[in-house]
Image (cartoon, rainbow, N blue to C red):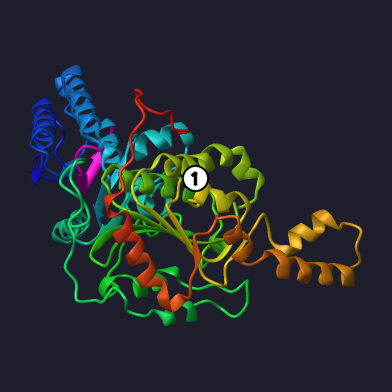
Amino acid sequence: MATIAPRGERSTLSAADANTLTEGVRAARQQRLPLVAVLSLSGVAVDEGLAVADSWGRAARELVLASGVIPLMMVADGPMVSGPALLLALADIVIFTQEAYAFITGPKIVETYTGEPISASSLGGSGAHARSTGLASAVVDTLDSALDILGAALAHFPDHVDGLTARMPTDDPLDRPTPEAGELLPATPMGSYDVREVIQILADDGDLLELKAAWAPNLVTALTFIGGHSVGIVANQTQAMAGSIDIAAAQKGARFVAMCDAFNIPLLTMVDTSGFLPGKDLEWRGMIRHGAQLAFAYARATVPRIGLILRKSYGGAYIVMDSRYMGNDVMLAWPSAEVAVMGAKGAVEILHRRASSEERLTLEQSYEDQYLSPYPAAERASISAVILPEDTRREIGAALNLLETKRERLRRRRHDNTPL
């Protein structure tokens, strides 16, 4: 593991510092080792002119060359100001210490242009990057805590793109029954539950490393082990916006799927969503384009991909949450799964607009009986198997073992064109 720590707190980035970072990244890539960089930069050394700008530009290019080749981990342990702050966004995982902050243009410039006074913490503090921008994978109190999290994360990664994730020894039986996972589902279709509790029940020893928990909380992204296999989890969280997918959730999921795919980490997608979040503002901000990012990330992923439909899986969200025809390998479903174009109420409103209230209730019940179950999807092979909640850990473990030797031949091309 290569560790690079430029000069101390409140330092500016000199050309020499940037060259050190560049050489460190290059050495890590050539030696096929994960990189951990601890950064604290209050800007660039303005007195060095273009030399320093050119040098951090070279550092950025070296990070891009290393992206997807070796894991890139960074800690923001103080200010990260001006152009060099962009370096953080090139990493796979970024941890902020509590007092760290990062922005391109500082409070004084923002006030000059907008007339609004704002503090460095409000503009780009650790809380802002955890909740609003999605840059911070986690926020901790100290540098030691940040390095502990990165150490835990690195246990899930191979050293480089051509390596495989290590099998983690565990005393937790793979065939351990998990009936309590199903018991977490509410009695009513509109009820919510914490999907992280389901994940912990399925995981080895209940261990879970959630990333970007405060950003787009309607989608959980986390790393865990199941049967000793490193697994990346993408799960709809019904406690936030009923698990619907908005722009931030699509971006969060797409970035996480791409990271797991780059480093041979199998994916488990846990589905319980009624669809994309509706709204004029979301559509104008590019819900189509950003929603396509999630579909794109899944469609190009070549790692083992397992799905589990817990409850609702409707419409476009059914497709982008790694459906079988997006290239998913094994799609499991609980008997509680509802796989359909849309819910009963919406379908009846479209198909039977002139029906009375009493007729609509009857029609909704008929629609639910006929369509809102996993079995029609299983008949179409959209679902591989309908399983009981108590068998879930065993079935997922069996799928991981089955797919352990999965290999796909990649198409020859320069690169794809992600809908950024």
> Tag 1, which secondary structure?
helix
**x, y percentage for residue 302?**
36, 43
Residue 90: say if magenta: no
Residue extending furthest top? 50
Nearer-the-camera pick, 232 or 284 = 232
Q: Mark yes or no: residue 225 visible.
A: yes
Nearer-the-camera pick, 44 or 223 = 223
**x, y percentage for residue 44?**
20, 30
Q: Which residue is drawn at 46% across and 55% down?
A: 216
Q: Which residue is drawn at 34% across and 23% down?
A: 414
**x, y percentage for residue 194?**
46, 71
**x, y percentage for residue 164?**
20, 49
Disc 1 crowd, CA 10 A, few/some/many (<14, 14-19, 20+):
some
Q: In this view, does 178 lie to the left or right of 48?
A: right
Q: Mark yes or no: residue 181 visible.
A: no
Q: Residue at x 59, y 65 (%)?
A: 374
In the image, is residue 17 above or below residue 349?
above
Query: What residue type is disc 1 on?
Result: Met
Q: Residue at x 41, y 72 (%)?
A: 392
Nearer-the-camera pick, 70 or 124 = 70
Image: magenta residue range: 68-82
Q: Name the residue under label 1.
A: 326
In the image, is residue 389 above or below residue 337?
below
The main secondary structure of the magenta stretch is strand
